[in-house]
Amino acid sequence: MSCKIAIDGPAGSGKTTVAKKLAEKLGYYYLDTGAMYRIVGLYLHSKGITPEDEITLSMLEDIDLKFIEGKFFFLGKEAGDEIRTPDAGKYASLYARHPVVRKYLTSLQKKIAQSGNIVVEGRDIGTVVIPDAEVKIFLEASPEARARRRFEELKAKGLNVEYSEILNEILLRDKQDSERDIAPLKPAEDAFIIDTTNLSVSEVIEKILEVVKIKCR
Ligand SMILES: Nc1ncnc2c1ncn2[C@@H]1O[C@H](COP(=O)(O)OP(=O)(O)O)[C@@H](O)[C@H]1O
Ligand SMILES: Nc1ccn([C@H]2C[C@H](O)[C@@H](COP(=O)(O)OP(=O)(O)O)O2)c(=O)n1
């Protein structure tokens, strides 16, 4: 029996860290849907196209977005740290509200999610991308904890960031992602909600594994 695990939640709640470790532990595929929105957001911004402009399918196909052996490629090159900057997250969230962007990326994500046992992380996985997922997890944490984590993460990568700026960026994306009309950030009705504010990564993974043992027998 194939088992699909959806992990949703706001920025800094621990989705990527937990999803990657979980997929490795279970021997499942892993899909970071946020990376796809980051690639699209950076590309459209670089072309001077705003989220208010008409965005066509052919514009998005010009990105030549590919997912090969767990890695993303666009414009013929592998996606690197350039998609992990605060600006990339800002543009991802801005263009993620556009119906053509959502339709295009959701269609790709649904196809990839059919690969077999997989952990998929994002904002609308349990509600839209794989609503039939056997396991649905919604991670949350205080904005301050999430900003602190992201601040430490970016600082460790050598980026010159201010905690207050990161907190404001996270609060803005929380609002944009949860208040948009299409596929807003919210827990699926059958999602298990885990507050990670005072939990270690291992403790979060242990909680998820308890659900997996029951739902993915
Ligand atoms: N439960 C946790 N406790 C402490 N730090 C965490 C926890 N979960 C994730 N982190 C750290 O916080 C940062 C952001 O985590 P990440 O998995 O990228 O969050 P998201 O994908 O939800 O934005 C990373 O440096 C990660 O190591
Ligand atoms: N399934 C998804 C994944 C990401 N997005 C949008 C909204 C998010 O703010 C941005 C960036 O997502 P990403 O998961 O990479 O960001 P964080 O790692 O949580 O900071 O993309 C989305 O709308 N739907």
Image: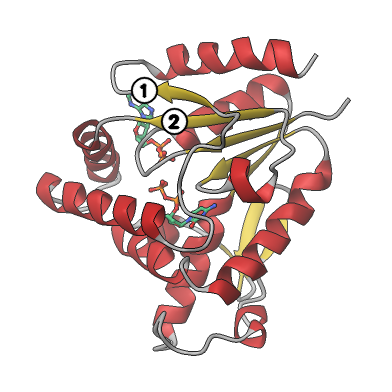
The residue furthest right is 1
Q: Which of marks 1 and 2 is nearer the N terminus?
A: 2
Q: Badge 2: few (under 14), some or many (20 or more) residues near its Cα, within 10 Å?
A: many
The amino acid type found where label 1 is placed reads Thr
Colour setup of the view: secondary structure
Residue 27 position within the rendered picture, expressed as x and y whole percent measured from the top left: 73, 25
Q: For mark 2, what is the residue?
A: 139
Q: For mark 1, what is the residue?
A: 196
Question: Is residue 21 positioned above or below 63 on the image?
Answer: above
Residue 102 position within the rendered picture, expressed as x and y whole percent measured from the top left: 58, 66
The residue nearer to you, when weighing 90 against 181, is: 181
The amino acid type found where label 2 is placed reads Leu
Q: Residue at x 64, y 52 (%)?
A: 71
The reply to whether the residue tagged 1 has its Cβ within 8 angstroms of ligand 1 is yes
Residue 200 position within the rendered picture, expressed as x and y whole percent measured from the top left: 37, 16
| Quarter of image, res 100 | bottom right
Quadrant of the drawing holding the N terminus: top right
